[in-house]
Amino acid sequence: MDDYLEILYKVLLEGSDDYIYINDCSTGLFRYSPTLVKMFALPGEIVKDPLKYWKNIVHPNDWEKFFKANQNIVNNRTEKHLIEFRAKKRDGEYVWLRCRGKLIRNKDKKPLFFAGTINLLGKENKIDPLTQLLNRSEFNIALERNIKNNLVKNMAVIMIDIDEFRQINEIYGRDKGDQILKSLSTVTQSILRQNATLFRLEKDKMGILMKNCKKSDVEQLYLEIQKELLKGNIQNHIRLDIEISAGCSMYPLDGVSAEDLYQYTEYALQSAKEQGKNRLVFFTEEILNEKKGKLDLLCQLRDDMKEGYNGFFLNYQPQIQHKTGKLIGVEVLMRWRNKDGNLVSPMEFIPILEKHGLMYQVGIWLLRTALRETKEWVLKNPDFSISINVSVLQLLDDKFLNDLYMIIEEEDFPPENLIIEMTESYVFKNINLLQKIFNDIRKRKIRVALDDFGTGYSSLYMLKNSPVDIVKIDRAFVKDITNSEFDLHFIRLVVDICHTVSIEVCLEGIEKDEEYEILKNIPLDILQGYYFEKPMSKDKITELYFEK
Ligand code: C2E
Ligand code: CA
Ligand code: CA
């Protein structure tokens, strides 16, 4: 090393708490601070081929990243270097280090030195250990830093999330899930340009900050990631269709504070999920307004729950025995009136309850209320059944079965008159888990119905060992029945198959004369739809069917 460099090096060493390193590009020799040599098992200050020593120092999980970054230095493939990793001290304890460096070139642009600092990060973990990406708090710091930086004229705040990641974890196991996350991060990182940084925010959610870019750049990036995933680069063993949703908000167009931008990007991502997943959605005013509307609904729902379920009530839709044309039971349907007195569809308010963990509580209220309100009917008619919808979140709650049995007992309701309806799409995806629960329920003489059959991943073969008593074919199959041979055949086939394994079949959503005419010769067991009756109040059912 030249003399003046030697002096400079000494000055730097004395004036800094950081460790300093210099790599002479012409010789490949590395020089490390004496304090660094003391702390870690390096052979001396000047080291030739240091990677073989670092191999024993760097944490195995961080080695690949470390190795690649160093190869890039040695091969002069990089101008800048920033890497965080765990390193084992001489006493065996691991510490987090951050290593920064920069390539210094001579007048002819030839690489001279690669030099930089290594500093102790303490125990605080800024890096996600699985993906080696910077974590959520680093994302927030970078977001704020970029906003304050005058050189950042605009920025895309992006979140990416793997669709159905929970299912993937459940079906293929956590290791596979981890592997997919790692691959997604590698794939994405290989596509990102200089102006963008990738972070892991939580579980399967990644964040990207892309500086000085256009919306079309974000679209392009999303398409490229999708393309790479599609290429199957990501899976080595199992062929899985990994799809991703993404949300994006733009600084300063959509917001100027880190908090707003984070929130707006999350809203955009949620909107992508709600619109059917596997897409990129940019934040808009409409998304914000819709979100505000939902938050307002949530507040009202919460208030009403606190006030003795004010605004909540039940409707009952008659179910007809096909063979006799007689009323055989009712389906309980939840209703809720908002503070302006308008009815809100359960399709709108139930997902809000579910999302905020309120559905269990409401479900318990509903169960008790339904049993109280319908008990007189089943006592008058022992063949009469009450069907209650149960959401999968309720069913998967450990308390559910106990609560169900306790309420039946407390209300002194005959269990053989109760049917629990559960949406098919959840059932078949989680069949092993639910099988046990269903068997338990059925042991208590309560029946189980598979709701919305035909809309999920249904396989007729799965009916063979299904622990259910009734299959309810979704009303989508009735809608088109007057001009779709397929739907008619499907219904016939389901009835045939179910009857061979003693499962009853209910068809929902019959509205018109023509539909009934076509269907009446199929040996369905139960019919339900506006053609017979719409959902109605308890008093109306009593008046129409029980006061004759
Ligand atoms: P679902 O369980 O499939 O309930 C049947 C839905 O179809 C009801 O809508 C009913 O009013 C409607 N329907 C019945 N016959 C006809 C017809 O002929 N034509 C048409 N177009 N529709 C018909 P509703 O009450 O709006 O409920 C929608 C969904 O909300 C239900 O679908 C169910 O998934 C959920 N839901 C309702 N009440 C509850 C509840 O108490 N608990 C849970 N977990 N979910 C509920
Ligand atoms: Ca239902
Ligand atoms: Ca249904």
Image: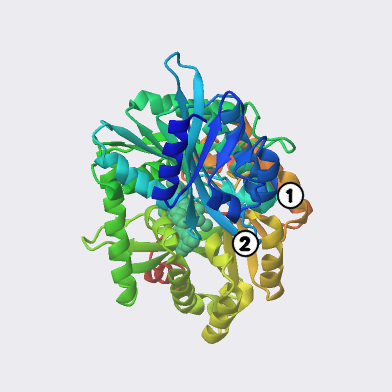
Provide residue 104's location: percent of width, then percent of height: 45, 26
Specify which label sits upstream in the sequence, 2 or 1: 2
Q: Is residue 242 left or right of residue 258?
A: right
Q: 169 or 334, which lies in front?
A: 169
What residue is pinned by disc 1? Answer: 462
Question: Residue drawn at (25%, 38%), measured in percent from left and top?
Answer: 254
Q: Which tag is nearer the camera, tag 2 or tag 1?
A: 2
Element assignment for label 1: helix
Question: Residue drawn at (26%, 38%), measured in percent from left and top?
Answer: 149
Residue 322 seen in the figure: no
User: Seen from this angle, which residue lies furthest top?
Assistant: 108
Q: Which mark is residue 93?
A: 2
Q: How is the image coloured?
A: rainbow
Provide residue 70's location: percent of width, then percent of height: 59, 34
Question: Residue drawn at (34%, 47%), measured in percent from left and top?
Answer: 262
Provide residue 485's location: percent of width, then percent of height: 62, 31
The type of residue carrying mark 2 is Glu
C-alpha gap between disc 2 and disc 1: 54 Å
Q: Is residue 295 left or right of residue 19?
A: left
Q: 484 or 370, which lies in front?
A: 370
Q: Quadrant of residue 386?
A: bottom right
Element assignment for label 2: loop
Provide residue 327's location: percent of width, then percent of height: 54, 63
Question: Residue drawn at (62%, 60%), measured in percent from left and top?
Answer: 449
Q: Is residue 432 left or right of residue 288?
A: right
User: Seen from this angle, which residue lies furthest front?
Assistant: 3
Q: 106 or 149, which lies in front?
A: 106
Within 10 Å of disc 1 (Cα), the crowding (few <14, some 14-19, many 20+) is few
Q: Quadrant of the C terminus?
A: bottom left
